[in-house]
Amino acid sequence: MRRVLVGAAILLAASTVAAVRFGGWAVVSVKDAPEYLVIDRPSTFDFVVRQHGVTPLEGLTPAISARKGMRSVNGRVVPTPAAGVYRATITVPSSGDWSVTIESGFGASKGRLLPIRAIAAGEQAPTTTPAQRGRQLFASAGCVTCHVHGGVGIRPLWEMNAPDLTGRRFAADYLTRFLADPSIKPKSPNMMQMPNPQLRPADIASLVAFINDERKVAAK
């Protein structure tokens, strides 16, 4: 029996590695993730699922849920006319910080947002700095699919040999250009070329502020 269980575990591990290597993973990128939720009011936003962070995936059946402590609620996801883009709606019943997860419907690939504060209707909305928004984007844009950053605390789903960005600093102008077009950096041996995350200039500015921790570094 033990031999059978060990064999099954090895087979499962091998099949997981094979799935990652031959295309069984995708990046979930949320567009305009909410900075806060309002109790008992639906929050709606779009997200895109891209195989290898590149090819939009249509015909999936994604799911969304939010969890706070032991309590969990499910939302609704519908496809949009745009290729690989889906619309999610979720409603939370109480205040506090809710962790939102999007199951892509493509293998084990998922989107994981940092906890979002839920407030009562009429309550003053929380404000965020560019660096704080960049921290949220690091998760919602899908950077956590491959990268580690100690300031975010979400482990990647796959082993991609992507750089650990904890404590790293880059010239702001170079990082801005790289996030707009990762192909400006030559591909490294044994490492995948980073896909273009298709970020807007404001999102790039927030990510630069977070990654650089609002510190200035010498021009590269």
Image: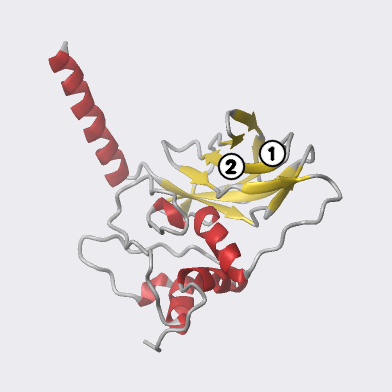
Marker disc for residue 125: none
- The front one of 154 and 194 is 154
- Classify 109 as above or below 198: above
Instruction: Identify which residue is drawn at 66% across, 64% down.
Output: 128
Assign a secondary structure to mark 2: strand
* Front in this rendered view, residue 145 or 118: 118
Q: Badge 2, how many Cα within 10 Å: few under 14, some, many 20+?
A: many
Vertical comparison of 194 with 107: above or below: below
Using the rendered view, name the quadrant where residue 134 is placed: bottom right
The answer for how far apart the CA atoms under marks 1 and 2 are is 9 Å
Mark 2 = which residue? 100
Q: Mark 1 points at which residue?
A: 90
Q: Which residue is drawn at 41% across and 59% down?
A: 149
Counting residues from the start of the chain, the first of labels 1 and 2 encountered is 1
- Badge 2 amino acid: Val
Whether residue 174 is situated above or below residue 25 in the rendered picture: below
